[in-house]
Structure formats: structure tokens, C-alpha cells
Image (spheres, helix red, strand yellow):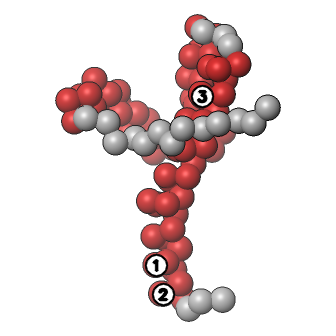
């Protein structure tokens, strides 16, 4: 069976973002000393909680799709521009 990920973008309506803004402000305060392990723990707890509330193959596939889309969007919007900046600064390979 093939996995199918529908591309899920993080660009939700401005009005829908308001419910998350205070959480993100609090997160920014604690994130200055955040390690990769800390971030892994936080993401894992969120995903495991979502999965445990509605266990199914469909839910697991959906959550894995979200992670894949987050990864790709982070690479496209943040990592690539940084890499391009460093190529410009230091020269290409």
C-alpha cells in the first residue's frame, strides 16, 4: 500500500492563528535554551497525544504527512535561503 500525503500548508487564516499566538509567545520565552532533544520531546508528546486520542492507520498516516510537510516547508522557506546566503558569502562548491 502506498502512503499518500496531501500537502498541508501552515498558512491558516489570520483569525485562526489568534488561538495559537499566546502559546507561541510563551514558547518563545522558554525556547532560547531549547535543545534538539527538547524539541523532539515536545513534538513527540503532541503527536503521541493526538494519535492516542484517535488511534488508526489513517491518523498515523495523517500525522506523518504533517511532519513531512513541516520538514519540506522549513527547508524551502528557511534552509534554502540560508544556504543561498552562504553560497553568496563563501562561494559555491
- Which element type, helix, strand or loop, lies under badge 1? helix
Q: Is residue 88 above or below residue 72?
A: below
Q: Which residue is painted at 66% across and 11% down in the image?
A: 55
Q: Which residue is mark 2?
A: 89
- Which element type, helix, strand or loop, lies under badge 2? helix
Horizontal and vertical percent position of residue 84: 49, 78
Label 1 or label 3, whichever lies nearer to me, is 3
Q: Which residue is painted at 50% across and 53% down in the image?
A: 74
Q: Which is nearer the eye, 93 or 56? A: 56
- Which element type, helix, strand or loop, lies under badge 3? helix
Q: Which mark is residue 85?
A: 1
Q: Are marks 1 and 2 in contact (CB under 8 Å)?
A: yes
Which of the two labelled residues, at mark 3 and mark 2, occupies the earlier sequence position?
3
Answer with the quarter of the image where residue 81 lies: bottom left
Q: Which of the image's four quarters has the N terminus?
A: top right
Q: Which residue is mark 3?
A: 63
Horizontal and vertical percent position of residue 46: 56, 23
Answer with the quarter of the image where residue 13 lies: top left
Instruction: Classify 10 Å Cα crowding around label 2: few (below 14), some (14-19), many (20 and above).
Output: few
Single out the residue that lies furthest toward the right: 1
Q: CA distance from mark 3 to mark 2?
A: 38 Å
Q: Is residue 72 above or below residue 54?
A: below
Q: Are marks 1 and 3 in contact (CB under 8 Å)?
A: no
Q: Which residue is painted at 28% across and 23% down in the image?
A: 19
Amino acid at each position: 500500500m502506498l502512503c499518500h500525503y496531501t500537502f498541508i500548508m501552515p498558512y491558516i487564516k489570520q483569525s485562526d492563528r489568534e488561538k495559537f499566538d499566546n502559546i507561541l509567545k510563551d514558547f518563545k520565552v522558554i525556547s532560547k535554551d531549547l535543545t534538539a532533544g527538547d524539541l523532539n520531546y515536545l513534538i513527540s508528546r503532541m503527536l503521541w497525544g493526538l494519535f492516542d486520542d484517535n488511534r488508526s492507520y489513517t491518523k498515523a498516516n495523517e500525522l506523518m504527512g504533517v511532519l513531512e510537510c513541516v520538514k519540506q516547508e522549513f527547508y524551502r522557506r528557511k534552509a534554502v535561503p540560508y544556504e543561498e546566503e552562504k553560497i553568496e558569502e563563501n562561494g559555491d562548491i
